[in-house]
Amino acid sequence: MKILVVVDSINIEDSSGSKANVALIKNLAEAGFDVLVYHYTLRNIHLAGVRCYAIPEIKFSPLYFLSRIQRVLSRNLKVNPAPFLEQLFGFSFTFYNDTRSITAALQHQKFQPDLVITLSKGGSFRPHYSVLQFPELHDKWMAYVHDPYPAHYYPRPYNWVESSHKAREAFFRAVSTKARYSAFPSLLLHEWMSSYFPNFAQTGVVIPHQNAKYVVQDTSFPSYFDVSKFNVLHAGNLMKQRSPEGLIAGFQLFLQHYPEAEKESRLLLLGPASDHAQLFEKHQKKTPELYIHNGMIPFDTVYLLQQSVSVNVILESKAEISPFLPAKFPHCVAANKPILALAPYYSETKRLLGNDYAYWAEVDDVPRIAVLVGELYCLWKQNPKQLLLNRSDLAEYLSVSYLKKIINKLN
């Protein structure tokens, strides 16, 4: 089967979404499909064993100059005209120029695919908008939906409502009706989006974020990491809605219960977390066992640490439901270390780990978090080598072989 992938970015350092996109692309190629990637990373990036074409940005057009003028005004005058302009025109000038650039590139490609997959990141969905312009591709188009869209369809506590929400609803309604297939990284997200766009219920399949082969280039540990300690790691973006306060308080309570653990335990929080700077400042002063890096970390380092710590943490927002499958979930499964899952009862993470999974708690349940960390610490003290996830079912679910079965089942 010949597969054309149209994707926003294949730079694994720019976002968790790009990491997930690259893993899916690699596994499609690993499964034996003939894969061609058109990407809008705006730089040449090569993926081993995959043909990649870097879509150039159109730089001589009214839309391009309007987008740059808007940026200059925003930067110099400290005024953001985007909400007004997007309410007026539906999307930003940058979005329109980017999608025109992708569309222009696709018009000249000679590949004759059996399947076209659009992948995006964040809230852009630019490849989806571009493929909408090609009716001849719609009967072989799979629209991959990585997150709820538009933004006001996010579950609480997310409460984003964009000024152009009606245009975005119309755009995604068209995607839901034109694409022959839709795909979602989680069952709960498929159900969630189908409640807003009923066509997804008929066209949708679940293709989870993938476990792709990854070889760490730099195997030296950063100076702040001591492999001999009981290390509990949360790696990833801590948005405003994902508060680590319960995790930190639970870890502190664990140390009170196990004073002897102070010298041999560490909680590491690595990744952008500017919304929680004051919280971090307060706790770091009284908890030297807490290490925080508020900023981006190279993926090589993060992946190495996930493989080497005692416990990996998946932390989600306090909510009634979390339909997301975190992009790092496959990395945590591949690490084969216990996952401390801090998520709502109705969450894709909990659904996959199962009702009988021992190390789950609500994100703000401090006493239970302390108990779970204590149990894991005691196991580590007995024998660090027994701290294993041992979930071959999840490894299979995230594997090349399972992906191949899903793609081959498409009509």
Image: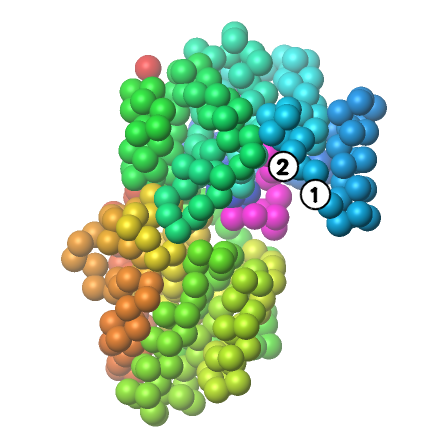
For the question of whether residue 334 can be seen, the reply is no
Residue in view at x 34 percent, y 92 percent: 260
Q: Position of residue 294 (x, y in %)?
A: 58, 66
Q: Quadrant of the C terminus?
A: top left
Residue in view at x 39 percent, y 29 percent: 183
- At numbered mark 1, what does the secondary structure look like: helix, strand or loop? loop
Q: Is residue 14 magenta?
A: yes
Left or right: 209 as drawn, with respect to 120: left
Q: Is residue 9 magenta?
A: yes
Q: Position of residue 185 (x, y in %)?
A: 38, 38
Q: Position of residue 250 (x, y in %)?
A: 34, 75
| Magenta-colored span | 2-16
What residue type is disc 2 on?
A: Pro
Q: Position of residue 302 (x, y in %)?
A: 52, 61
Judging depth in this view, the residue of 232 and 151 nearest the camera is 151
Residue in view at x 59 percent, y 39 percent: 10
What residue type is disc 1 on?
A: Asn
Q: Quadrant of residue 69?
A: top right
For the question of whether residue 387 can be seen, the reply is yes
Packing grade of label 2 (10 A; few <14, some 14-19, many >=20) is some
Q: Quadrant of the N terminus?
A: top left
Dot 1 and dot 2 residues touching (CB under 8 Å): yes
In the picture of the structure, the residue carrying the numbered disc 2 is 83
Left or right: 274 as drawn, with respect to 385: right
- Per the model, the C-alpha gap separating discs 1 and 2 is 7 Å
Packing grade of label 1 (10 A; few <14, some 14-19, many >=20) is few
- At numbered mark 2, what does the secondary structure look like: helix, strand or loop? helix
The numbered mark at residue 217 is none
In the picture of the structure, the residue carrying the numbered disc 1 is 80
